[in-house]
Amino acid sequence: MIRLHQAAFSYRDAEPVLAGVDLEIAPGLTLLLGPNGCGKSTLLKLAAGIERPDSGRIEIDGHDLWTDEVAARRGLAYVPEQPDLTPYATVREVLDLVCRLRGEPREQGREALERVGLGKLSHRSVRELSMGQRRRAVLAAALVGTPRNALLDEPLEAMDRGAREDLLAWTDRLVAAGAAVVVVSHEIEPFAPRATRAISVRDGRCVDAGPLPSDPAERLALLDRMARGEAPDLEVRFAP
């Protein structure tokens, strides 16, 4: 469970990105939609503890992300849009660190690298990897342990067909296990049938789409309008 309580954030004082967001994300797959620059990635960064809110608080499974950080982060996985990793560390060293932070044996890191196809490249430094390989390394880090909450920002970008299928299968397993999965993606088609909820970000607030249509075509049409920032027939419900 992920909760944002009156969370506000701005990069510049006069330009708030998020304004007093109250949001509760329960188990299931939640799509976070809206045009570029609306605040989707910023909201994920707040929920992941990458950015600190100017006001309000963030809770992960009841633990405050900034005052009870270790407990809050233990069950949290974050796959950012830009795979920023320590450039001079080896892939193996990065995964070893993740295992230590999550209290998992190092062997889990080795297994995660094998699952994403980087087992034979674990000795390489991050700067020696292609962009696609870096994204797979970030995904491997997310695979360590069994996250109860996963935040995925453009997770399919730069992924080949096999890696995309593996990632989608992983999200299916997480949801089946009762995890809360939040996805930001320009490619909504693979996630549309999997989504249990859709939220758009508008003017610093979060708007819940309500029950999603069961008809695949209607569902995709609604999600597409939300992704474009266009939902004229959508009853506005500020997300609880």
Image: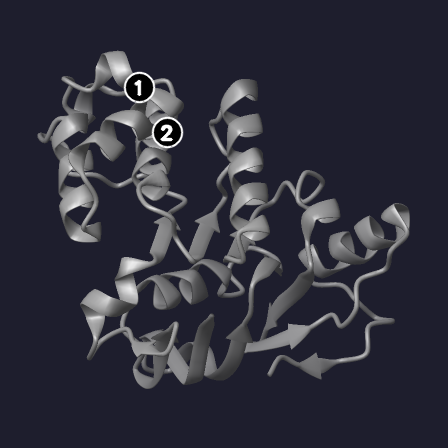
Q: Amino acid at mark 2?
A: Arg
Seen at 57% across and 27% down, the residue is 165
x then y, percent, for residue 228: 70, 56
- Mark linked to residue 136: 2
On-image quarter of the C terminus? bottom right
Q: Is residue 214 left or right of residue 95?
A: right
Residue 138 in the image: above or below residue 229: above
Please say whether residue 204 is visible from this viewpoint. Answer: no
Which element type, helix, strand or loop, lies under badge 1? Answer: loop
Q: Quadrant of residue 27?
A: bottom right
Q: Amino acid at mark 1?
A: Leu
At mark 2, the secondary structure is helix
Residue 95 spot, x, y in % from top left: 20, 35
Q: Position of residue 61 (x, y in %)?
A: 39, 72
Quarter of image, res 73: bottom left
**Looking at the image, do the residues carrying marks 1 and 2 touch, with CB atoms under 8 Å apart?**
yes
How far is the residue under mark 1 from the one under mark 2? Answer: 8 Å
Residue at the limit of the structure toward the left, as seen here: 88
Q: Residues within 10 Å of mark 1 (few under 14, many from 20)?
A: many
Q: Is residue 160 above or below residue 1?
A: above
- Tell me, for residue 118, which label it has, or none: 1
Label 2: how many Cα within 10 Å (few below 14, some 14–19, many 20+): many
What is the residue that sits farthest to the top in this orientation?
120
